[in-house]
Image (tube, helix red, strand yellow):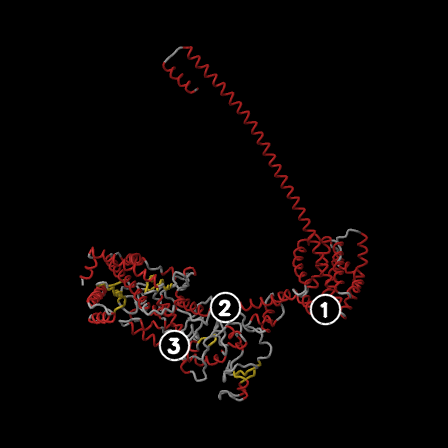
Amino acid sequence: MQTANESHPDSHRVDSYSNDSDRDLYTIPSYSSWFSWDEIHQNEKIAHSDYFNSTSISKTPKIYKEYRDFIINKFREDPIRRLTFTEVRKCLIGDVGSIHKIFRFLKNWGLINFGVRPSDVYCGGAAENLGRFDSGARSSDSDCNRGDEDEVRLGRLKVVVEEGAPSGIRVAEFPNSTKVLAAAPGEAAVGSGCEEVGEDGFRLPPLTSYSDAFGEAGRKKGCWNCGAVCVSGYYESVKQGGSVICAKCFKNENYEESKLADDFKLIDVDGTGNFGTDVWTDSETMLLLEAVTKYGADWNLAERHVRTKTKLDCISRLIQLPFGEHLLNASVIKGVDRSSSYHASDVKQMGTTSATEPQEEPSRTEDQHHECMMSADVAAGQVEDGDGSGRPLKRRCITSSGDAGSSLMKQVARLSTIVGPHVAAAAAKAAVASLCNENPCAIKFYEAEEDDTSHDLGFPTLNNETTRVIEGADTDMVKHKQSDSLEATSEKSGPSTLQIRVAIATALGAAAAHAKLLADQEEREMEHLMAIIIEAQLRKIECKVKHFEELELIMEKEYSQVQQLKDSNLSDQIEVLQHALNAGISRWKDDSSKLSTNHLL
Amino acid sequence: MKSLLPIASKQPIKFRIPAAENLVPIRLDIEIDGHRFKDAFSWNPSDPDSEVFMFAKKTVKDLKLPPTFISQIVHSIQAQLTEFRSYEGQEMYGGERLVPIKLDLRVNRTVIRDQILWDLNNFESDPEEFARTFCTDLEIEDPEIGPAIAVAIREQLYEIAIQNVASARETRISKKGRRAAEFVTASKSGGTALDLVKLFGSKASIIRKRKEWDLYEPIVDILSAEEAEALDAREERNARLKKKLDDKDDGYITRFTRS
């Protein structure tokens, strides 16, 4: 029965294990070789028939497969440790009885807990204590027997089948596993053929440690005959894939009688091509990266840091990584101050150039553009020529990132256009000066070269007509000079590297100047904006004050009006009362007058 | 055992403990003249009753209890067996039901808390084996714990089975057609059962959510001697209190005189 399997898209039966280096290797006993991630085998269907007769909602083939896959995956997260049912059941929804049944099934077939510590046998001390006065004792007895069987099996197990693993789970590779592989197909057909294994079987080591699995020995093939690890090379059977014997046994004609010497072909382990093929776990890669950032190109130290891989493996792995080379360069450069700061500024430069590009574009003339390209080409040429020179660190940093030289020259040119001629010239001068301090022989070179270096960089922002003319004249000269220097560099590489360094220093200077300019401008802008803000705030407060004053005035006016009104009211009332008193007294009027007098009081 | 598997899950089946072996959980708590005897174990109800007396005699002898205990033990076991047998032969609802079983027990100085799901329809499930695995996996050495867990599970299954019988009876009485009957069963007896369609539907994953792992994870605590003593004392106090109450309304005695 084929079931869709989304979780392990790349897993299939590993019959052609020999070139399956991209997958992790697990050990399962040969009698379980029927197992496959993608299918549910007849054995499973018979043992768990309740899942396959569709009588219940909670027991379907899909659910069975989910249980099974989860349990196996859980075990393979750490195949050295014994997986317990108690651990599994807390993660699985469902009847503990049926999950336990699946768990037992997988355990009995060696799909989980295979090759873990033999002391952890299933039949624990608690077994005898159960069912003290009832027929439960019967069942515990049978369980004990089962446990004993397991123990026997564990002791005699010799056969291992490599199994395709789900991606993401890394497991130890079993040393000498290939030897065992060969035995699998024959016995696997029987299913439970573990009893028939001959005396050439070996005992599983109780613990497969990490270094065992990934260390040197783990990748060597074990001899089919003597079990020794084949160090230098081994013979592999042509007819029966994976059947391996070591060179010593081959010489002594110590192989199975059914085979002829011609059936074996020599496989040399020492040859190249075996490197970088083995599996790197994520943690190993992390260790490698750590080592590289820490120690740089010191592979001995890196090897020691990673621990489980050889020097060559480390190198090949690093090369395979998409960013490995850059990383290596970055760490190598660290040794040289100047270059490292170059690296940093290079990054910064990227930002500034891209930001200012639109502005400078129109001002650039065709000629200058050409010149830029020229200088870039020259630089690239110099870089390539510099390859042979005896400054390994320096050379490395330039050659490694392909067109670093050319892009550097381009950027220098571009930068100098941004910052203006005077700044660039000053930067170049300072760079040359400091270089000359460092290396006296450079003075000679730069005395000749100096002016065209500065011109080389191109100053398109010059509006001055005369300089432009001069520059035009100079460009020709520059081209001559450059072709000269190209020839010169092919002979002696010293000047070329110097030139590059000057260019770098110039670029740095220019970038710094530009950055300074930008920073100043920014600061001014900020000050200006702050001033505007403060002014606006002041104006706002003024407005408010004015408004409040107006309000106060209005209030005062209204107050006086109210006062007037009050006064007139009072006088009116007094008048009315007077009139009433004068007109004569009635009872009703008396009341009302009382009321109003009260009111007045 | 396979023959016991109901092919149509809705068909009612005869009452039994929904586990591989039909064993009755028996709990004894007898106090005579200051001597207290507490125990829990499972008993095969098809064993002849003479075994009960043999068992009581042996236990009293082994534990050096006063001989007055023998009759009390026999009495208690017989009563519990009779109660179990009174359900036998009755029909109970045999549908597939997943019930959560909560374990919370203390044996000597070990406290165990756990939660599991149990399928009432799975007559192959084995509480004894579960308990055994539990002890092995958690490396519990106290030999009394395994049987205690098994009995605790059995007691809960027994309880649920009794409820099942009651609900099956109710269903039969209210003959309102199949659908209505099912509804009644689902709502009455399924109070604690989980929604199977929700759990095992095509969309659901049988892998539990990570945050729920703790809920279904066994917790084993070893108490210090003082803590255990304190708990013992409290339990004894509670038991005495309860006994006084029971004596008052005579409920305790009527339960035993019925047999």
Q: Is residue A482 left or right of residue A104?
A: right
Residue under label 1: A386
Are the numbered discs 3 and 1 placed on the same chain, yes or no? Answer: yes
Q: Quadrant of residue B231?
A: bottom left
Query: What chain is tagged by disc 1?
Result: A
Residue B218 versus residue B174: which sits nearer the camera? B218
Where residue A308 appears, as percent x and y from the top left, is 54, 72
Where residue A414 appears, as percent x and y from the top left, is 71, 57
Where residue A148 appears, as percent x and y from the top left, is 36, 77
Q: What's the residue at 18%, 61% (across, down)?
A: B258
Residue type at the position of mark 1:
Gly
Q: Please say whether residue A42 is visible from this viewpoint.
A: no
Residue type at the position of mark 2:
Ser
Residue B34 versus residue A430: which sits nearer the camera? B34
Residue under label 2: A167
Residue under label 3: A150
Which quadrant is home to the N terminus of chain A? bottom left
